[in-house]
Image (spheres, rainbow, N blue to C red):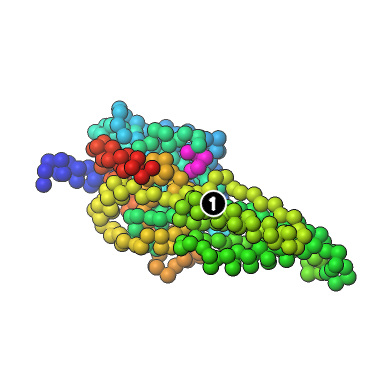
Amino acid sequence: MSVTQVSSSGLKDSLATRIDALRPELEQVSRDIYANPEIAYEEHKAVGWLTELLKRHGFSVEVGVASTPTAFVATRRQGDGPAIAFLSEYDALRGLGHGCGHNLIATASVGAGIALADLLDRHPGKVLVIGTPAEEGGGGKIRLIRGGIFQEVDAAMMFHPDTRTQVLHWALAVTHMHFEFTGRAAHASGDPEKGINALDAFVMAYNGISVFRQQLREGARLHGFLKEGGTAPNIIPERTSGEFLVRARDTAYMEELVQKVKNIFQAAALATGCSVKLSFEEEPYTDLRNNMVLAGLFEENLRRVGVHSVEGAPWENAGSTDMGNVSHVVPALHPTLGIAPADVPGHSQQFLEASGSLRGYQAMVDAAKALAMTGADLLADPGLVEKARAEFRRET
Ligand SMILES: [Zn+2]
Ligand SMILES: [Zn+2]
């Protein structure tokens, strides 16, 4: 073993020890976020707890970056060197609390940032913890990209809890659409011929989407729900509304599908005599690009922590994330760590329980360690940052 390997190994042991020492503070904040779920752009408590912890450990914190009250950037810097960012998510699901485990993501990134920043006197550079709200719809990271937050970042990393531990992760491009059909109310028995049925319009659109599914390319997904379906059984429904998501493996095909879905909704409006209003949330999420330099380092560090990853088939069980958009701006990493058995669905009651379990908190700590160690690799050898950047440029 060479001298550098010995010192880098000692450095990594010290990061692990540091994160073990931080565990009570990290776990407390994670539990508080879990017990107080806040949805997109309402994550004020979570931001308060996370930034307080970061300030206590010497970070300078700016809350409300990119004109977004629940976004923040926490920084510690010493000298000149790479800028390593850990991304913290903390939003909950509408109606299901932390059924996606963002309480664990939040503190894993904060823990990694605090531990890594302690190495800055030996390896100069900048450590950032970026608070990114509204991942479950709302696209917080897209706002931060537009606000220029990633301009000086060399590598952006986070982990996501899952049923499997996988270093590489695939995510679909997605567009979030809202629809509203408007018809005319009428007595459903006395005057049905005077009514225009907005529920019929929805049923036709829903069926149109269902038959269209056979023609989709592999991996594309169309799914949604009805929010308002009428008010009483004896009134022809005057208004229906709801939301649909359109997903595909790349943005170009997703846009093609969005156009076809729009046509289906307009056809249903025409057929029933309703009017239809379609609106779209923010910018779409893009697919996720795995930076293989960062992935290689992370995999080795995860093994050092004692966690073994599996190789999954690309695109298996793919969802979407606004980390995809970040991965098109800077070299990025979005591995998963298993916190629940394989048969547990994401966004479910069981996954919610796993996100508040001992296994969940252990994964949070393991992820914090492997993320911090990967940051240490980059700070100690800026040549690796250049390699990650070169790969990123080749792929763009
Ligand atoms: Zn989710
Ligand atoms: Zn999630």
Helix, strand or loop at label 1? It is helix
Which image quarter holds the C terminus? Answer: top left
Instruction: Decide: few, some or many residues near mark 1? Use Cα within 10 Å; few <14, some 14-19, many ≥20.
Output: some
Amino acid beneath label 1: Glu
Give the residue drawn at x 48%, y 62%: 217
SS assignment for the magenta stretch, majority: helix
Residue 214 in view in this figure = yes
Give the residue drawn at x 19%, y 46%: 9
Q: Nearer the viewer, residue 168 or 106?
A: 168
* 6 over 335 or under it: above or below: above
Give the residue drawn at x 64%, y 57%: 263
Relative to 378, 72 lies left or right? right
Q: Give the range drawn in magenta.
A: 141-145
Relative to 42, 299 lies left or right? left
Extreme-top residue of the structure: 79
Q: Which of 237 and 23 is in front in this view?
A: 237
Residue 154: quadrant of the picture: top left
Query: Is 209 contained in the magenta span?
Result: no
| Image location (x, y in percent) of residue 126 | 34, 33
Extreme-bottom residue of the structure: 189
| Image location (x, y in percent) of residue 389 | 32, 39
Relative to 349, 181 lies left or right? right
Extreme-right residue of the structure: 190
Q: Mark 1 points at which residue?
A: 255
* 189 over 17 or under it: above or below: below
| Image location (x, y in percent) of residue 185 | 82, 61
Residue 49 in view in this figure = no
Residue 372: quadrant of the picture: top left
Give the residue drawn at x 25%, y 52%: 300
| Image location (x, y in percent) of residue 88 | 44, 45
